[in-house]
Amino acid sequence: MCEHIEDFHRTVLMLGSLAVYADQPDADHSFIEAIGPSLASSLPEPPPGMFPPGYDPTDGPDYPGQG
């Protein structure tokens, strides 16, 4: 497995773990607010082939209050 794919999977795993931690009653929300955006911004581009050709993540229905 190439390093780029490993980085992507590792970062997604850490974001998932942070989400699980955030649901704990004694979670440190200051930590979550500091680390969450940092992890999300360090997420590399998805590996080739992860999404179908022509996939546009911004294409879809409007969320409530948008559009």
Image (cartoon, helix red, strand yellow):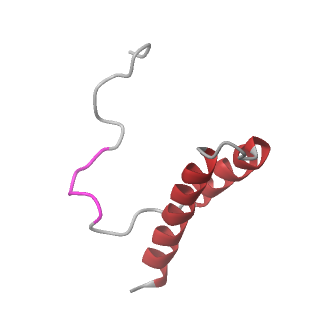
Q: Going by the picture, which residue comes out furthest to the right?
A: 30
User: What secondary structure predominates along the stretch shown in magenta?
Assistant: loop
At 65% across and 48% down in the image, what residue appears? Answer: 37
Q: Say how many tags the image has.
A: 0
- Residue 42 lies left or right of residue 64; in this view the side is right
Q: Is residue 11 depicted above or below 38 in this figure?
A: below
At 28% across and 26% down in the image, what residue appears? Answer: 61
Q: Which residues are magenta?
A: 50-56
Q: Quadrant of the N terminus?
A: bottom left
Viewer-nearest residue: 8 or 15: 15
Visible in this render: residue 44?
A: no
Q: Going by the picture, which residue comes out furthest to the left?
A: 53
Visible in this render: residue 67?
A: yes
Position in image of residue 16 (x %, y %): 51, 57
Position in image of residue 54 (x %, y %): 22, 51
Q: Quadrant of the C terminus?
A: top left
Position in image of residue 4 (x %, y %): 47, 77
- Residue 34 lies left or right of residue 66; in this view the side is right
Q: Is residue 54 covered in magenta? A: yes
Q: Going by the picture, which residue comes out furthest to the front?
A: 25
Q: Is residue 25 covered in magenta? A: no
Which image quadrant for residue 2? bottom left
Which image quadrant for residue 38? bottom right
At 75% across and 48% down in the image, what residue appears? Answer: 34
Q: Is residue 8 depicted above or below 53 in this figure?
A: below
Q: Going by the picture, which residue comes out furthest to the bottom?
A: 1
Position in image of residue 8 (x %, y %): 48, 68
